[in-house]
Image (tube, rainbow, N blue to C red):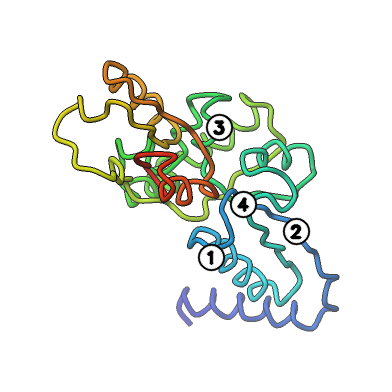
Amino acid sequence: MGMRTIVAAVVAAAFAAGAQAQAPATKTIKVQSTWPASITLQDHLRILAERIDKLTAGAVKIEAMSAGQIVPPFEVLDATNKKVLDGYHAISYYWVGKSPTMALFAGPPGGPFGMDHMDYLGWLYVAGGLEMWREFYQKEMKLDVIMWPAHPSSPQALGWFKKPLRSVADFKGMKCRQTGLNAEIYASGCRASSSTTTRRACTRTIPSASSACISTCGRA
């Protein structure tokens, strides 16, 4: 019997023994996202909840809540730290106001600048990025949370604009919704053109763009 067969047999036996044991009580985990219920990012949280339910044979269930169901979107990190929530589903660059380092763990770092999503996953799982992420949150930020990567984002576009841009001067008078370090870059690079950069949750971006409250956004 080869090594692979031995390992498979041991694993099968362990699963068989576990199946014969009494089923544990169901644990329900309250997880709120920063996303509105209508977008695909919230669908990802729902899919994650379904997979965990299947993998644990119903022993662990995630109550997948959308933005605002218990706390406002940008308060989910603090709410999890304070045990108001059991967890949250978001992207860390929303909290660059707490520390610019948050942008490093936002896949890709800084928004559209740096690694793509495959590079990012390699950094997390092979090059120590995940350990650094957890250490930063717990030791540096003093947060009682543990991070689990759920879904990396690909490099973000410069923006979706309502009119053509041919020079920096075309930014004049614009209101631009950006997140993370992108907001600082837009504010710095377009300052001479009197462009206004704002941070807002995804729950408000699409309606704001449609109603002309903002002229462009970096992420819907």
Could you tell me if the residues under marks 2 and 3 are in contact, i.e. CB atoms within 8 Å? no
Disc 1 marks which residue? Answer: 43
Q: CA distance from mark 2 to mark 4?
A: 13 Å
Find numbered disc 4 in the image and state the secondary structure of the residue it sits on: strand
In the rendered image, the vertical position of residue 163 relative to residue 132, given as above or below: below
Q: Earlier in the sequence, mark 3 or mark 4?
A: 4
- Closest to the observer: 19 or 143? 143
SS at badge 1: helix
Residue found 85% across the figure and 78% down from its top: 22
Q: Is residue 168 left or right of residue 134?
A: left
- Asked where in the image residue 106 lies, by quadrant, the reply is top left
The residue type indicated by label 3 comes to Trp
Q: Which mark is residue 33?
A: 4
Disc 2 crowd, CA 10 A, few/some/many (<14, 14-19, 20+): some
Residue type for callout 4: Ser
- Mark 2: secondary structure: strand
User: Which is more toward the observer, 170 or 7?
Assistant: 170
Q: Disc 2 versus disc 3: distance between alpha carbons?
A: 23 Å
Q: Residues within 10 Å of mark 4 (few under 14, many from 20)?
A: many
User: Nearer the N terminus, badge 3 or badge 1?
Assistant: 1
Mark 2 highlights which residue? 29
Q: Is residue 3 left or right of residue 166?
A: right
The picture quadrant where one finds residue 216 is top left
Per the model, the C-alpha gap separating discs 1 and 4 is 11 Å
Residue corresponding to mark 3 = 95
Residue 150: horizontal and vertical position, in percent? 52, 55
Residue found at x 82% / y 79%: 21
Residue 88: percent from the left, percent from the top? 65, 49
SS state under label 3 = helix
